[in-house]
Amino acid sequence: MSNYPFKLQPLPYAYDALEPYIDAKTMEIHHSKHVQTYIDNLNKALENQPDYQKWSLERLLYNLEKLPQEIQAPVRNSGGGVYNHNLYFAIMTPNGKPLADGTLKTAIEKDFGSLDALKEQLKAAGLSVFGSGWAWLVADDEGRLSIYKTPNQDTQIPANLTPVINLDVWEHAYYLKVQNRRAEYIDNWFNVIDWDAAQKNYDKFGEVDFSKM
Ligand code: MN3
């Protein structure tokens, strides 16, 4: 967890590391331009708000309605943008890492039947986001998995759900490589998912309580 002034987290791999599935130019612009802009706008919203500068990003996003009116929209949009992308970049890795035996695999098989069935539902969710937004695999406080969707840069935080993986379906995530073919981007993206990182995220269910951050 971090607080103001927020900084761009370095990518844990090179811009071209997710090739051929996600191209270097997309990754470079996505990280160094889009996310940097969210960082800048989030910091700008908070620069004259000393009361909120010590709040973590999670706390700001959970308590959106308690924030001063004038910073609610920038925190929601830009703060959400920072949070969502930090997670998204962290659950990808070159060539992906397979889903190993463990609690996440067990939960996926229990709640979806199989990994393939989960992928199918996640893809359908991503395709059904109208305009820009995100599709998620989330866990409740008992570890039950479900698919979740958010518009724009909204997060799963107000619902107090533990994020496992998230899929960016904004056109900026894929347009350079596959233009309007969102389905092709999602199929490519499945090849770079880091299921070890997903397991680590899943391990936090029951401990994560955004109302206390
Ligand atoms: Mn994005």
Image (cartoon, rainbow, N blue to C red):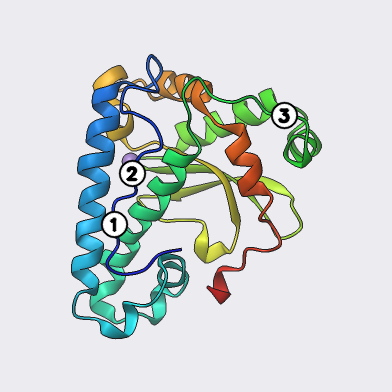
Q: Residue at x 29, y 51 (%)?
A: 8
Q: Mark 1 points at which residue?
A: 7
Q: Of label 1 and label 3, which has the lower sequence position?
A: 1
Residue 178 visible to an observer of this rendering: yes
Gap in angstroms between the C-alphas marked 2 and 3? 27 Å
Q: Mark 2 points at which residue?
A: 10
Q: What residue type is labelled 1?
A: Lys
Q: Mark 3 points at which residue?
A: 100
Q: Position of residue 146 (x, y in %)?
A: 66, 45
The kind of secondary structure element at disc 3 is loop
Q: Is residue 110 left or right of residue 78?
A: right
Nearest to the observer: residue 159 or residue 22: 22
Residue depth check, mark 2 versus mark 3: number of the one nearer the observer: 2
Gap in angstroms between the C-alphas marked 1 and 3? 33 Å
The answer to the question of whether label 2 and label 3 lie on touching residues, with beta carbons closer than 8 A, is no
Q: Which amino acid does label 2 sit on?
A: Pro
The kind of secondary structure element at disc 1 is loop
User: In the figure, 121 relative to 133: above or below?
Assistant: above
Q: Which amino acid does label 3 sit on?
A: Ala
The kind of secondary structure element at disc 2 is loop
The answer to the question of whether label 1 and label 3 lie on touching residues, with beta carbons closer than 8 A, is no
Residue 165 numbered tag: none
